[in-house]
Image (cartoon, grey):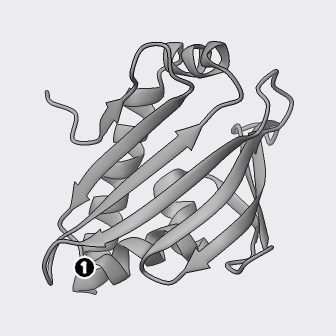
Amino acid sequence: MELKTKIHAEHGKQEIFIIREFDLPVELLFRAYTEPEIVEKWMGTKVLKLENKQHGGYQFETSNPQGDVVFRANGTIHEFVSNEKITRTFQMENTPFPPQIEFLEFEKLNNETSKITIHTIYKSVDFRDQILKLPFAKGINMAHNRLQEIVSNFIQS
């Protein structure tokens, strides 16, 4: 099965590009990244904080069925332009990975479709390569597939 979310990682560079087209208007795609209730559904994580503004911050947390925290991430939002772009840092807590910077760009393709391009820059090529060794591509594809399904159902209700 072909993965709809494409990951482009050029050898020897400390960046990746994540690109996905959605059958969603750009306004709904943007909301999927900025409204805590929608983020929680498609990411499968709890939104502890999400301040959608310049100099805002966010924090996400995932727990296992026993209630133990298994993942926590946070960052600062540096640029926020509705339906167009978000520039933010991203850091996974309790891991050896340093913060990364993410440039999320939302593009209207037509009234019913849109595209997101996420340009992520890592501190080093080595850190980027370590991330790519994780089930990263499969995970982002699964999450984006849920985003498409959840927000599509959201439109219909």
Q: Indicate left or right for 17 with 3 as reference.
A: right
Residue 96, percent from left and from top? 82, 21
The image quadrant that residue 84 belongs to is bottom left
Q: Residue at x 59, y 50 (%)?
A: 102
Q: Residue at x 51, y 67 (%)?
A: 33
Up/down of 31 relative to 17, above or below: below
Q: Indicate left or right for 80 with 89 as reference.
A: left
Residue 143, percent from left and from top? 41, 46
Q: In the rendered image, which quarter contains the C terminus?
A: bottom left
Total marks in image: 1
Q: Residue at x 27, y 83 (%)?
A: 155
Up/down of 132 relative to 75, above or below: above
Q: Residues within 10 Å of mark 1 (few under 14, many from 20)?
A: some
Q: Indicate left or right for 136 with 5 as reference.
A: right
Q: Indicate left or right for 95 with 139 as reference.
A: right
Q: Residue at x 49, y 59 (%)?
A: 104
Residue 64, percent from left and from top? 70, 37
List the residue tagged with mark 1: 25
Seen from the viewer's position, the closer of residues 31 and 81 is 81
Q: In the rendered image, which quarter contains the N terminus?
A: top left
Residue 137, percent from left and from top? 39, 29
